Amino acid sequence: GFMTRGDLMPKPALYFKEVGDGSHVTAKFTPILRAYITSDYQETAIIRGAIDTPAIWEHDLAALSDSTTWNLTRDPSTGHYTIEEA
């Protein structure tokens, strides 16, 4: 859980309904990197909620190398964007 200064108890980050006290739970975390194309945000905007446009690309972050380079390309005839590894 997470605690804020002054809190007596942490706020839960995950909650499992049917798991009793003393039970063991294993959670699998799969970080997914997604790319979106939209004009709804400014360059330095902090995104605080769901994005209202579909992702054009996604990849398991754990499967990426420590350093990767990607090319973002726009097809002028369709206006569609693609991302490919360089």
Image: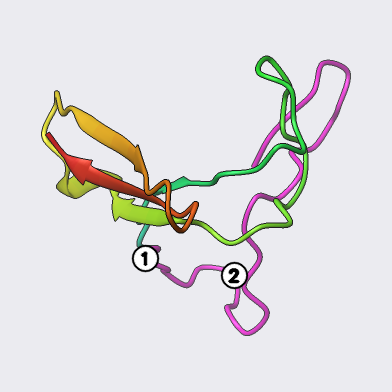
User: Residue 8 vs residue 76: left or right?
Assistant: right
Residue 24 lies, with reference to residue 29, above or below; the image says: below
Residue 14 belongs to the span the image colors magenta: yes
- Can you give x and y, in whole percent of width and height, for residue 25 in the image? 42, 68
Residue 48 lies, with reference to residue 12, above or below; the image says: above
The local secondary structure at tag 1 comes to loop
Which amino acid, by three-letter code, is at mark 2? Asp
Q: Residue 84: which numbered mark, if any?
A: none
- First in sequence: mark 2 vs mark 1: 2
For the residues bearing labels 2 and 1, Cβ distance under 8 angstroms: no
What is the quadrant of the C terminus in the image? top left
Rendering quarter of residue 72: top left
Q: Residue at x 88, y 18 (%)?
A: 6
How many discs appear?
2
User: Residue 54 vs residue 86: left or right?
Assistant: right
Task: Point out the residue furthest to the bottom here.
Answer: 18
Q: Residue at x 59, y 70 (%)?
A: 21
The local secondary structure at tag 2 comes to loop
Residue 18 belongs to the span the image colors magenta: yes
Majority SS type along the magenta span? loop
Label 2: how many Cα within 10 Å (few below 14, some 14–19, many 20+): few
- Can you give x and y, in whole percent of width and height, for residue 9 in the image? 79, 37
Residue that carries the numbered disc 1 in the rendered image = 26
- Can you give x and y, in whole percent of width and height, for residue 84 in the image? 21, 45
Q: Residue 21: which numbered mark, if any?
A: 2
Task: Point out the residue furthest to the front here.
Answer: 77
